[in-house]
Image (spheres, rainbow, N blue to C red):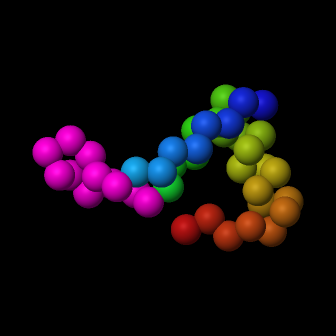
Amino acid sequence: MDTQISFLSEGGTGTSVHDLSIEVDDLDSALARVKEAGILIE
């Protein structure tokens, strides 16, 4: 599974953004693996 991680400080014209963005090819599979590992998603 390919994964892309991005760290951002601000969006266009100073728009606030999330501190961390993670993009995956298969969201269902990624969520299942995260839950199995007991990682909290906020």
Name the chief secondary structure element in magenta. Answer: loop
In the shown orientation, is residue 17 left or right of residue 42? left
Residue closest to the far right:
36
Q: Toward the viewer: 23 or 30? A: 23
Position of residue 19 measured from the top left corner of the image (x, y, whole percent)? 44, 60
Position of residue 11 measured from the top left corner of the image (x, y, whole percent)? 26, 46
Q: Is residue 10 placed above or below 39 in the rendered structure?
A: above
Q: Toward the viewer: 21 or 36? A: 21
Q: Residue at x 85, y 60 (%)?
A: 36
Position of residue 15 measured from the top left corner of the image (x, y, whole percent)? 20, 52
In the shown orientation, is residue 4 left or right of residue 32? left
Q: Residue at x 72, y 30 (%)?
A: 2
In the shown orientation, is residue 7 left or right of residue 26? left
In the shown orientation, is residue 31 left or right of residue 20? right
Q: Residue at x 20, y 41 (%)?
A: 12
Residue 16 in magenta stretch: yes
The magenta-colored residue range is 9-19
Which image quadrant: the N terminus? top right
Q: In the rendered image, which quarter is residue 24 located in?
A: top right
Q: Residue at x 55, y 68 (%)?
A: 42
Position of residue 35 measured from the top left corner of the image (x, y, whole percent)? 78, 60
Number of labels in the image equals: 0
